[in-house]
Image (cartoon, helix red, strand yellow):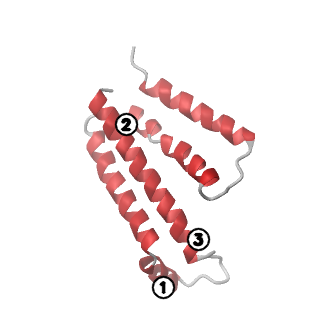
Amino acid sequence: MGFGNIVMLIITVLTGSIGQFFLKKGATKLGEVSGSNFNFVSHVLGIIMIPELLVGLACYAGGAVLYILILTRVPLSVLAPSVALQYVIAMIVGQYVFGEIIPNYRWFGLGMIICGVMLVIWKK
């Protein structure tokens, strides 16, 4: 994968990660949705009224467009696993921004994801 493709991949991953961040921020404002209090129309209206959710959705849409563009240049077998780097960013944001507790075995799994991505994009 060339330098330009790597930059495009990084932007795609960051855009998706930023989208996840804003979706989480907005979801906390939306409140917990359960089967007993589920009203589809009111929750859709709630989503539309929460700016963070709209920003998150827009970031996801932008990331999807970038993903499509980079798919024209990079094989799916390389690109799809590489986008798993969003999981790395999501876990770090979960712990340091949202105060989530991340057990050691998840950190180990995160390291395995990073190693796996490196192996996928490795070029002889």
> Residue 92 at x, y = what percent?
59, 47
Helix, strand or loop at mark 1: helix
Crowdedness near tag 2: few (<14), some (14–19) or many (≥20) residues, C-alpha within 10 Å: few
Upstream in sequence: badge 2 or badge 3: 3
Q: Which mark is residue 41?
A: 1
The amino acid at mark 1 is: Val
Q: CA separation, marks 1 and 2? A: 37 Å
Please tell me which residue is depicted at 65% across the width and 78% down the height of the picture.
35
> Residue 3 at x, y = what percent?
30, 28
- In the rendered image of this protein, does residue 108 appear above or below residue 63? above
| Viewer-proximal residue among 35 and 106 | 106
| Viewer-proximal residue among 104 and 67 | 104
The amino acid at mark 3 is: Thr
Residue 105 placement: quadrant: top right
Helix, strand or loop at mark 3: helix
Crowdedness near tag 1: few (<14), some (14–19) or many (≥20) residues, C-alpha within 10 Å: few
Residue beneath disc 3: 28
